[in-house]
Image (cartoon, rainbow, N blue to C red):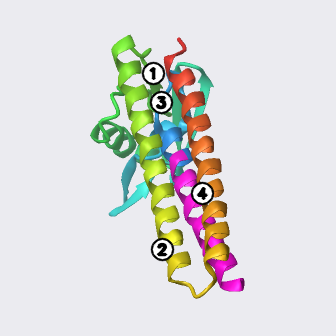
């Protein structure tokens, strides 16, 4: 029984990781409002080391359409500006000598649909991860030396866990899709 509980625990851990990865990916999908997370993928050449932008500057969103990047060292303004352009996020940074201001253009209907498809794809990837954890757990249960009845009960438990995590993925996707498609 302890071995079976361990197998189910590992499956739950794997499914949880798939869900956490999905949540992280959904944060990177922009829904039209300015959010400092939009710049999380930007890496700046900080004295020869590629460094995350949030480690060398404060990033704020004073309103829903603007991001401001205030570097801790003014000499980094050009490097940060260059890194934002290189990241190819579709932003046009403006350097005012003190900070960098980025106006976030409103999303077109076509772009919103693309982002919704991307969100759906990420949700599907999470479900694939969940099913993979289920498959692995079920094969370990079958290999165990427990009786057939116990194996069947644990397979049912694993399927219930799978259904629970799949419903969480669907919920996260619905929320993100609504956020993306709402103007």
Q: Residues within 10 Å of mark 2 (few under 14, many from 20)?
A: few
- In space, the residues marked 3 and 1 are separated at their CA atoms by 10 Å
Q: Could you tell which of marks 3 and 4 lies nearer the N-terminus?
A: 3
Q: Residues within 10 Å of mark 1 (few under 14, many from 20)?
A: some
How far apart, in angstroms, are the residues tagged by discs 3 and 4?
33 Å
Disc 1 vs disc 4: which is toward the camera?
A: 4
Question: Which quadrant of the figure has residue 175?
Answer: top right
Quadrant of the image for the N terminus? bottom right
Q: Earlier in the sequence, mark 1 or mark 4?
A: 1
Q: Which mark is residue 159?
A: 4
Q: Nearer the observer, disc 3 or disc 2?
A: 2
Disc 4 crowd rating (10 Å Cα; few below 14, some 14-19, many 20+) is: some
Element class at badge 1: loop
Q: Earlier in the sequence, mark 1 or mark 2?
A: 1
Q: Which residue is mark 3?
A: 30
Residue pointed to by mark 2: 139
Q: Nearer the viewer, residue 97 or 6?
A: 6
Up/down of 146 relative to 160, above or below? below
> Does the magenta portion include 87?
no
Q: Which residue is mark 1?
A: 104
Range of residues picked out in magenta: 1-22
Label 1 or label 2, whichever lies nearer to me, is: 2
């Amino acid at each position: 029984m302890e071995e079976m509980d361990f197998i189910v625990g590992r499956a739950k851990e794997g499914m949880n990781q798939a869900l956490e990865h999905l949540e992280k990916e959904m944060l990177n999908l922009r829904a039209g409002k300015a959010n400092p997370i939009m710049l999380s993928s930007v890496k700046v050449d900080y004295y020869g080391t590629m460094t995350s932008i949030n480690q060398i500057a404060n990033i704020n969103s004073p309103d829903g359409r603007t991001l401001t990047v205030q570097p801790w060292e003014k000499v980094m303004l050009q490097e940060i500006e260059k890194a934002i352009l290189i990241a190819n996020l579709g932003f046009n940074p403006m350097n005012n000598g003190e900070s960098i201001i980025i106006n976030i253009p409103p999303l077109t209907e076509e772009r919103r649909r693309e982002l919704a498809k991307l969100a759906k794809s990420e949700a599907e990837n999470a479900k694939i991860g969940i099913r993979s954890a289920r498959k692995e757990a079920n094969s370990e249960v079958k290999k165990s030396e427990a009786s057939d009845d116990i194996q069947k009960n644990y397979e049912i438990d694993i399927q219930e866990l799978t259904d629970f995590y799949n419903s969480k993925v669907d919920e996260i996707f619905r929320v993100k899709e609504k956020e993306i498609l709402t103007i």
